[in-house]
Amino acid sequence: MYKLFSLAALDLNHKEMNQTMIELTELSKKYGSFLAVDRLTLSIPPGEVFGFIGPNGAGKTTTIQMISGLIRPTSGRVRIKGSDMGKDPVAAKGKIGFIPDRPYLYEKLTAMEFLKFTADLFSVDKSRFNAKASALLSTFSLTQWADELIESFSHGMKQRLIMAAALVHDPEIIVVDEPMVGLDPQAITLVKQILRDFADKGGAVFLSTHTLHIAQDLCDRIGLINKGRLAALGSVSELKSVAGTDNEDLEDLFMALTK
């Protein structure tokens, strides 16, 4: 069973509610002659869970990699709560907790060692690490596995560990790509609660997913990217207006907007 999660344990301090958390300006990425993302402009405020959806190959993962500083844009700018990712990537990345769709883990480390490794990358106060790491492992039902090698973990356990690692430095923004892959229904409910509570505390969540019912249930606004360009943006009700339909089912809206 998963334990009820308390964001108080993460010492979040999201007080600047008037500052844009993620700002993308004319963001583009080319691979040779292929334009993967085409002049994407987007602004995510504090307190929002933002859903990013689109067909395969539409540019979702490329966008997330640029936001997270994993790849450089061909043109345009990424700002993370005022920090320019191109000019000051260390400051910008320090404000982000990144959860990829496929966990990248050092499998010869234990779960606790991996959290310590991650915490050291972000200069987490050593005097507070043990309590914070223990709380996160408990939240994600990994306490009994704290000293086991990651190579023995199931996919779902690895996914939960990477989420714990993304939160260990108290980020102000969570960027997450397909967070529910490999999770059981209880873990999915827990993760949805964590993301919602995180935003309600003044953080921001940028969530890319193919699971449209999760986007519909969880997200305040949704951006639909298609062929590298932002095709629609708004709440489900606003997307309904763009699609020219009375149907508020996101799957039907998705099909209508990507024809």
Image (spheres, rainbow, N blue to C red):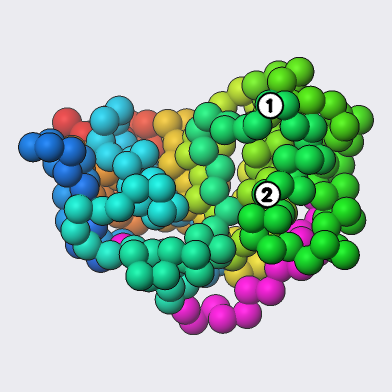
Of all residues, the one furthest to the left in this rendering is 33
Residue picked out by circle 2: 118
As shown in the figure, which amino acid type bears the numbered disc 1?
A: Glu
C-alpha separation, residue under disc 2 versus residue under disc 1: 14 Å
Residue 140: percent from the left, percent from the top? 78, 38
Rendered residue at 31%/36% (across/down): 54
Residue 197 located within the stretch drawn in magenta: no
As shown in the figure, which amino acid type bears the numbered disc 2?
A: Thr
Rendered residue at 27%/40% (across/down): 59
Q: Is residue 168 left or right of residue 50?
A: right
Question: Magenta segment, which residues?
Answer: 3-24
Marking on residue 107: 1
Rendered residue at 55%/64% (across/down): 95
Quadrant housing the N terminus: top right
Quadrant housing the C terminus: top left
SS class of the residue under badge 2? Answer: helix
Of the image marks 2 and 1, the number of the one nearer the N terminus: 1
Asked if the residues shown at circle 2 and circle 1 are in contact, with their CB atoms under 8 angstroms apart, the answer is no
Q: Is residue 175 left or right of residue 119?
A: left
